[in-house]
């Protein structure tokens, strides 16, 4: 029985070592002028890029998982957090968790407290390629407290997701979703109310 637990114990030790090596991300954040609260942890390399004069603020006790097996559902890419214009503001609340999540702000992205982003999620307030005449203006994104985004969810510009809402796996969120609901689909729609 003890031998069977050895693999789990070894995995737990290596995971803690990865989090210790993850502290190098704090140096990268400092280099890019990203403000990070206390006790934020990294497993694997997280990429930061802050456009001059813009701001990126990350709260306390957040977690960024970027290694392929740092989340056993499977992480396809590292976490990437960026601002892409000088007016952009990106704010992440306390106790938020990200697995291979890409967040790109041209205007404003505000992520509340206790938000969980499943593997390979994307949050953006722009269509990107702003020089293309087919692209519209960036529009702010707001994700309320206690929101859970399932695996592969994409949140696009101009969306507000109300607090406590759960967005189902593989959903494409193109319009705002109210608080305290389960929503899913492409495009994402409310499918059930949650008890308040």
Image (spheres, grey):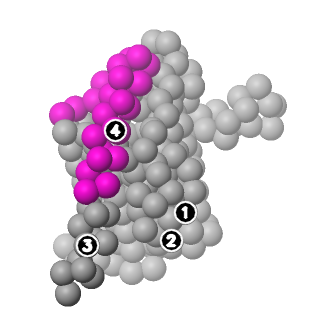
Residue 169 is tagged as 2
Q: CA distance from mark 4 to mark 3?
A: 23 Å
Q: Earlier in the sequence, mark 2 or mark 4?
A: 4
Q: Is residue 64 left or right of residue 183?
A: left
Closer to the camera in the image, 61 or 51: 61
Q: Residue at x 28, y 40 (%)?
A: 20
Q: Tell which tag, 4 or 1, sits nearer the viewer.
A: 4
Q: CA distance from mark 1 to mark 2?
A: 6 Å
Q: Is residue 113 visible?
A: no
Residue 6 is tagged as 3
Residue 21 is tagged as 4
Image height of 90 relative to 30, above or below: below
Q: CA distance from mark 3 to mark 2?
A: 33 Å
Q: Earlier in the sequence, mark 3 or mark 2?
A: 3
Residue under label 1: 152
Q: CA distance from mark 2 to mark 4?
A: 30 Å
Residue 108 falls in image quadrant: top left
Q: Residue at x 34, y 47 (%)?
A: 18
**Badge 2 element:** loop
Image height of 156 relative to 135, above or below: below
């Amino acid at each position: 029985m003890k031998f069977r637990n050895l693999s789990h114990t070894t995995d737990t030790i290596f995971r803690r070592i990865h989090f210790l090596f993850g502290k190098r991300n704090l140096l990268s954040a400092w280099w890019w002028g990203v403000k990070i609260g206390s006790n934020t942890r990294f497993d694997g390399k997280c990429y930061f890029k802050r456009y001059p004069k813009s701001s990126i603020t990350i709260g306390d006790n957040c977690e960024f998982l970027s290694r392929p097996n740092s989340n056993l559902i499977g992480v396809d890419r590292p976490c990437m957090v960026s601002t892409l214009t000088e007016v952009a503001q990106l704010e992440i609340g306390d106790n938020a968790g990200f697995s291979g999540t890409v967040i790109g702000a041209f205007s404003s992205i505000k992520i509340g407290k206790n938000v969980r982003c499943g593997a390979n999620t994307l949050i953006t307030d722009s269509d990107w390629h702003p020089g293309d005449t087919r692209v519209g203006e960036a529009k702010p994104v707001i994700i309320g407290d206690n929101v859970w985004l399932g695996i592969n969810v994409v949140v696009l510009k101009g969306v507000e997701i109300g607090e406590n809402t759960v967005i189902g796996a593989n959903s494409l969120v193109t319009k705002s979703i109210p608080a305290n609901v389960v929503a899913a689909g492409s495009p994402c729609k409310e499918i059930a109310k949650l008890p308040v």
